[in-house]
Amino acid sequence: MQRAAKIQFLRLFFILIFALAGASAQDWVRIEINRGAPIRLAVPDFKAASNDPQTAPLNTVFNQTLWSDLDNSGIFEMVSKSFYPLQTPGSPGEIKLDAWGNPPPNASFVAFGNLGISNGKIQVQGWLFDDKNTASPQVLGKQYQEAATPDNARLIAHRFADEIIYRLGGGIPGVAESKIFFISSRSGHKEVWAMDYDGAGQEQLTHLNSIALSPRVSPDGSRVAFSGLRDSWQILLYSLDLGRLISFAHFGGDNFSPAWSSDGSKFAFSSSMRSGHPEIYVTDATGSGAKQLTAVKGSDVSPVFNPKTNAQIAWVSGRTGLPQIFTMDADGSNVQQITKEGYAVSPSWSPNGLLLAFAWIRHYGPGAPGGQDIYIMDVASRQFVQLTHDSGRNDFPSWSPDGRHIVFQSTRTGSEQIWTMLADGTHQQQLTRTGKNSMPNWSYK
Amino acid sequence: MKPSKRNCIVVFTALLLALGVSGCGGKKPVQQPQTPPPQPKPVTATLSASPTSIERGQTSTLTWTTENADNVTLQGKKVDPSGSQSVSPGQSTDYHLVATGPGGTQDATARVTVTQPQQTTTTTTTTTTQSDEELFNQNVVDIYFDYDKADLRPESRQSLARAAQFLNQHPGWRVKIEGNCDERGSTEYNLTLGEERANAAKQVLVQGSVSADRLQTISYGKEKPVCTESTEDCWQKNRHDHFELLK
């Protein structure tokens, strides 16, 4: 799996550079990530396998979720349902492979199965068949059973989707069961909220009744660090297991934008604890042993560890005037300026450690065209690609654990809302619609 | 400020007690048996106050005696020929006794001097707080910044110099300096920009001899705008340091 992932990332990297080289005539370019040869996948609705009145509504939830997960993954070309054979297969005995593998569907793979309710439980059987391998077509055969609720219908669909994505997407686990943490003001105060990666199940976590900002989930998914307004701004920890705040070190001054190292052993954040100036500090996982990494005039904030190595930190500094993205080694040495023009903020390091996503007003100044958009940059070559265009102010990109998606905030609808897109800028989807929602952070798995 | 508040309450309580005492104490006239004069004798009158000097809210006792008078007034009001009375004047007062009899008229005067109490004179604590804050807000005023800058404008340095002088006259007062930004740009970067703005003001106050431990800084970034329109006028109002008196 490790090897497969590596190959996938190298391919991603290669395509990015290729697209940049071939697009010099345009003001901006689009890139293709993992889409060299999209796999044609057919997903007929699962067959109802019981007469229980709950079957139809839960099957609808399941089918919609499965389709949307596979479509969102960015690795499939979903074969339109209008091309499907009239007979819907509910089990391997009912499928006629040539009817799916030839035109009009011309699918490479077909995912199918059945869903029934018995004794208050949903039971799902799902298969993935390779249409071109008639001798031994079965790639996957899975069974699931959970209490019969809409949430569980969604959960089973996510699990089956992730199995398919893992099997056909280069051995990289899917993100259908991942979570997004964010700030919402819909309760009247800015609090930390959580939702599924597709926007379902939005739920309030904190009740500070002041202001909570910059949520960052721990690599093991058990805690969320954020900056909360008490007498001063403090780094606070919320335990998802306990459903409440747990203690963390208290620092002098104001403390902002916490970040975890990907092994969970270190924290980086911005603090005015010593000099009064916001500087980047690193502590261990308990908040002790604070070590100051920056000491140059100008604000320093928004640190993020390179999740592949934890040996580098990218952050935002105002030392040259307007904020720019910089990188340094995790001990504060070897400072490199990454962006050199405009207003660049909110770096997020891709899981493979090669790319930085960030928000950039590239042509900044009176009368300059362009808004604040999401870009990704190859750290080694400094080549960059713009992912959002002409669509309000976009900020706070955060990578999905598979490196194929980016969640971000945008004002394109008139208020701050949370959106996702594939890492090539396509498939942009709005996840939140109630109140103002901002500062999304995608879980590590 | 805490101890002085408590003193005010003590003074206030003492005043109430004193008023109560003056209401039900005193007025114990001593009846002098009158003997019909065979012939007019000279009228005499004496008036004394004890003590002659009080703090506002305290009481003094007036004592008077007369001889050969059939009409005696104190401050124009008829009183017994001899007696005593507690008084609690709000300001220094001359008390005037007039005794009239067949033998003529005689008067006597006593002065009760009223001094200011050593603590604040007002009687309720809320009035004190408001006036402190009004005074503070008149002398420690908001300062404003250029876009994406934490550098102090010349007029900001002048107003901070005045603020430092004022704070040096009120050494017990502590100050919260709140740095703020306009709505443009990133939430996290604006928090640190607000921090730099608050810190810039703090450094000038410290240079003006205000002790650093009296000054607390906090940034609200763009989280607490005073104005919510997307205009330069409104943005300018939001790019400011605000100062709060901490009690």
Image (cartoon, coloured by chain):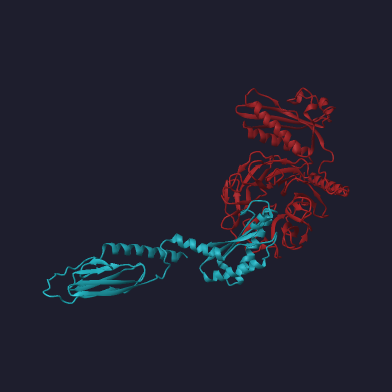
Residue B126 x, y percent position in the rendering: 45, 59
> How many numbered marks are there?
0
In this rendering, position of residue A445 left or right of residue A337: left
> Residue drawn 70% across and 31% down?
A63
Is residue A275 visible in the rendered structure shown here? no
Chain with cyan colouring? B
Residue A313 x, y percent position in the rendering: 73, 57
Chain A tint in image: red
> Residue drawn 82% across and 55% down?
A380
Residue B150 x, y percent position in the rendering: 68, 63
User: Going by the picture, which residue comes out furthest to the bottom?
Assistant: B42
Is residue A118 visible in the rendered structure shown here? yes
Q: Does A121 sit above or below residue A313?
A: above
Residue A379 x, y percent position in the rendering: 80, 54
In this rendering, position of residue A424 left or right of residue A215: right
Closer to us: B158 or B175: B158
User: For residue B191, which quarter of the picture?
Assistant: bottom right
Q: Does B146 sit above or below residue B91?
A: above
> Residue drawn 46% across and 63% down?
B128
Closer to us: B74 or B125: B74
User: For residue A95, which quarter of the picture?
Assistant: top right
